[in-house]
Image (cartoon, helix red, strand yellow):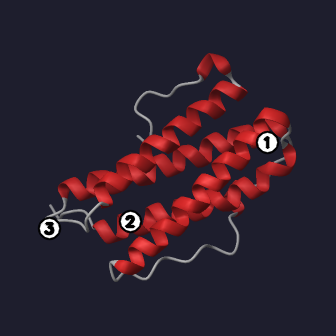
Amino acid sequence: MNAPDVPAAWQAALAAEHQAAFGYGLLGPHLRGTALALAVECSDAHEALRDATEQELAAAGQPPVPPEADYPQLYPVPGAAAAGKLAARLEDDCAAAWRFLYASTAAAGSAPPAGVRAAAQEALTASAVRAARWRRLIDPAHATTPFPGV
């Protein structure tokens, strides 16, 4: 069995961050009050993580994957309920991508660049927490997901 491709997993995590940054732009106009404040907070976090990940990849000699021009799988967003569900999905997608990078660094045949595994764990945790916040906001009875990112 081949060891996971850490650079490819790292690029996939960046791609998930690109999608999240784009997605929050789609859902923001449908939200008000607490939900809008949470969307802005989440968007800012994803944009910062996206930018940091691009810099880290470049520093490791890996040209960062560019964002897509559009993400049609995120449409439509007809209202606030759909926007909240999309936000939770964006967070789940990011958690899954960062979890895969975390697992890839553990199974890799050689040591990943310094700090990648810790950054992946931190990003996974942050996305899982944001997803739980969205779920609590849109459906308090189902606010948590066991094993986020899986």
Q: Which residue is mark 1?
A: 36
Q: Which residue is mark 3?
A: 110
In the rendered view, would you say 138 is above or below 19?
above
Residue drawn 86% across the image and 45% down it = 30
Circles 2 and 1: CB distance less than 8 Å? no
Density class for disc 1 (Cα within 10 Å; few <14, some 14-19, many ≥20) is some
In the rendered view, would you say 134 is above or below 13?
above
Could you tell me the amino acid type at mark 3? Ser
The image quadrant of residue 141 is top right
Report, in whole angstroms, how far the alpha carbon at label 2 lies from the one at label 3.
15 Å
- Viewport quadrant of the N terminus: bottom left
> Looking at the picture, how far across and down is residue 19, in whole percent?
61, 61
Q: Which residue is mark 2?
A: 10
Select label 2 or label 1 by which is in front: 1
Density class for disc 3 (Cα within 10 Å; few <14, some 14-19, many ≥20) is few
Could you tell me the amino acid type at mark 1? Leu
Which type of secondary structure does the marked residue at label 2 adopt? helix
Of labels 2 and 1, earlier in sequence is: 2
Report, in whole angstroms, how far the alpha carbon at label 2 lies from the one at label 1.
29 Å
Which type of secondary structure does the marked residue at label 1 adopt? helix
Residue drawn 72% across the image and 49% down it = 40
> Looking at the picture, how far across and down is residue 123, in whole percent?
44, 50
Of labels 2 and 3, earlier in sequence is: 2
Residue drawn 49% across the image and 38% down it = 128
Report, in whole angstroms, how far the alpha carbon at label 1 lies from the one at label 3.
43 Å
Could you tell me the amino acid type at mark 2? Trp
